[in-house]
Amino acid sequence: MSLHDWPLLGVPEFTGFENYIAAFRDEGFLRAAGFTLLYTVVTTPILIILAFLLAFLVRGGTRAHRFFQTIYFLPVVIGLASGSYIWLFMWQSDIGPTTTLLGDLGLIDPTRNFFAEFGSAFAIVVAMVTWKVVGLQMLLVLAGIQGVPDEVNEAARIDGAIPWQSFWHITVPLLRPTLALVLVFSVAGSLLAFDQFYILTTGGPAGSTITAVFEIYRSGFVKFDVGYASALSILLMLALGVVSAVQMLLLRNSDNS
């Protein structure tokens, strides 16, 4: 389909690689790809750092630790669309509980439309995704931490290593496969972002929060240019293939170290 001028209704016409050439000349798609990269660069380190911190906070086996493990993981079981609608309601001007509370405290103007400004809309989406996803990342890191043999850290303590030295020089290197997996999950999820922007910002303001998948959706189901949308999908698949290759490289290097 990507090699054709393939309308949603009508007869397809073979065009070769014209759709791919058009993709690299399409300012809308290039802008969407750039925004997707920005979103990925911002979201990925936030998720990994928070997942790491939460995993260390709840790594014990007490009831309190298990309770907070459950609390942090609960948003993961909520659908991304459902979570997006929850946050959309929370941040609605005048009627949203968050805007009302912050307005009563005098911290914000409760009539302000946070989704009409790029900075605030982007921050809300990043916060929502972090709340929604970080619990899963935490569990992955926690599984890696629990897989580190106690004898290794005990030997380091006997040799005089202080806690942060043991953490940095022993725990972190042993967590490389886990961190590689979390990294790839975070990057892949960010590159495929769609629901949260479609629901929370609808691509606004002025098209500034349109992601690559959002642009594919618009090309295929708004403009009815299925052939071009297929070409964009292939390009995105290739990008994800590069991410997978990086994952395999990281895992292989970890196994060899």
Image (cartoon, rainbow, N blue to C red):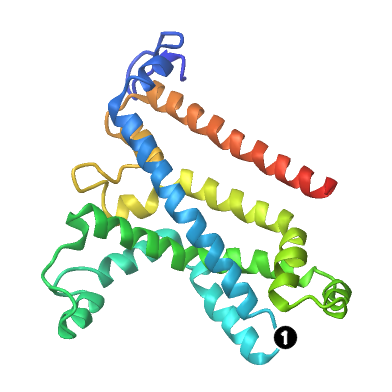
Judge by depth and name the residue closer to the eye, 84 or 145: 145
Judge by depth and name the residue closer to the eye, 119 or 217: 119
For image coordinates 45% across by 68% down, the residue present is: 131
Asked if residue 40 shows in the view, the reply is: yes
Amino acid of disc 1: Gly
Residue lying at the far front of the rendered structure: 160
Residue 155: x %, y % from top left: 88, 75
- Secondary element at image label 1: loop
For label 1, the residue is 61
Vertical side of 40 occupied by 231: above or below: above
Q: Is residue 193 left or right of residue 164?
A: left
Vertical side of 185 occupied by 143: above or below: below
Res. 110 image quadrant:
bottom left
Q: Is residue 213 left or right of residue 121?
A: right
Vertical side of 134 occupied by 155: above or below: below
Residue 171: x %, y % from top left: 74, 66
Residue lying at the far bottom of the rendered structure: 63
